[in-house]
Amino acid sequence: MASALRKIPFSVQILLGLVLGVALGFVARANDLAWLTSTLDTVGGLFVQLLKLAVPPLVFAAIVVSVVSLRGVANAARLALKTLLWFGITALIAVSIGLGLGLLVDPGKGVTLDLAGAAAPKKTGSWTDFLTGIVPTNPVGAFVEGNVLQIVFLALVVGAAALLIGEAAEPFVTFNKSVLAIVQKALWWVIRLAPIGTLGLIGNAVASYGWDLLAPLAKFTTAVYVGCAIVLLVVYPVLLLAAGRLNPLRFYAGAWPAIELAFVSRSSVGTMPVTQRSVERLGVPREYASFAVPFGATTKMDGCAAIYPALAAIFVAQVFGVQLGVTDYLLIAFVSVVGSAATAGLTGAIVMLTLTLSTLGLPLAGAGLLLAIDPILDMIRTATNVAGQAVVPTIVAAREGTLDRTAYDSAGNRDLVDAEEPDPVDADEPERLAPVPA
């Protein structure tokens, strides 16, 4: 049975899980089968929990190793700056699309909701909390609580120190490479369960929400999906063509396993091993990919931190009858470009949304109006996030002349998940660093 299942391409397995989940969800909702809804919720919840379990050690070890690996990369500082610049450029484009759609469709006008029942979410964000929350009061607490932003801060500091110390830090770096390889191996087993996780997550969403809850928010939901689709299918392909002189179809053929897993898992960090492998298979040098992908998985959020908060802020303002001006729209763009690290790569974008609402002075209770449909929105948001996390290093590598264009043109010819599991982490591959002729 297992061998027969492995013969089915992983992407097809995901699709089968998606279709079966939708069917079971409709059956559970139509017949009011609480036990089936609970089972689907448990299956999907366990899959997400397994992904989250690997997040703290994965993020810490990946960033430490990636920072140290930069010593073998020529012009590492320039690469890092260019990566950050492209993160900012794509975020600015994404938030502009979100604002444009919001002004065009007016997602909150005509919406009738029970505002008395709206309450601010328990987890909110503010600039003070964001800035003070970066530095942990207890390093162990950051790992126990799964505070990804604090773990990223610790990993960057430790990685930079190890980089400067040099040879004396090699045992520690080797240990982190081993931890990263072990966690990636275990996480790969979890990823193999994605078809079952997809069945549970999608099935529970359909059974719990159906169309009844989506109806009042249909315009807003559609706007989020359209905005993400524009970024995915128009903005990224145009940037690949114009900035990297790359065929977008080949990019999506290579990056599709990561985008697909992101859609069903709703976790950028949980998808990170597949994203990094996809980027490497697209011809990006491993040394650079090992820095750009983990960094992007925790800070690069075009869906959750750009398109969504822009549309949501306009929606909340219209529902509560607040008039937004040009300054407010500029603030939304600023928060999206600068504050996206607040989302920290985990499921959901509530912290980023409340950060945006608090900056604009809008009622935080407005975020509570959107909590019910957040899982539905989070699927396309996370898929957009991960696509952006793969697009940027690909473009930067192409512009730097280090992209293996032969590998890029052949990407997607094999099923990424079925073909192979992650190789042991090895940052010492200087032969991959030489510029590849365009």
Image: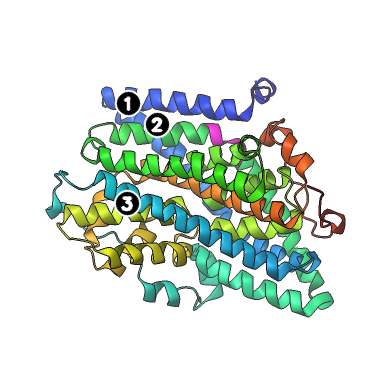
Identify the element where label 1 is drawn: helix
Tell me what residue is drawn at x 52 percent, y 62 percent: 88
Give the x, y percent position of residue 27.
Answer: 33, 22
Tell me what residue is drawn at x 42 percent, y 39 percent: 42
Q: Is residue 373 highlighted in magenta?
A: no
In the picture of the structure, the residue carrying the numbered disc 2 is 203
Residue range highlighted in magenta = 191-195
- Which dot marks residue 311? 3
What is the distance, in whole Å, between disc 3 and disc 1 at their CAs?
32 Å
Assess whether mark 1 and mark 2 are in contact (beta carbons under 8 angstroms).
yes
Task: Give the crowd class for mark 2: few <14, some 14-19, many >=20 residues within 10 Å.
Answer: many
Q: How many marks?
A: 3
Whether 105 is drawn above or below 53: the answer is above
Question: Residue most toward the right?
Answer: 431
| Camera-side residue of 83 and 268 | 83
Q: Amino acid at mark 3?
A: Leu
In the image, is 339 to the left or to the right of 85? left
Q: Is residue 192 highlighted in magenta?
A: yes
Assess whether mark 3 and mark 2 are in contact (beta carbons under 8 angstroms).
no
For residue 413, what is the image quadrant?
Answer: top right
Task: Give the crowd class for mark 1: few <14, some 14-19, many >=20 residues within 10 Å.
Answer: many
For residue 40, what is the image quadrant?
Answer: top left
Question: Residue most toward the front?
Answer: 242
In the picture of the structure, the residue carrying the numbered disc 1 is 28
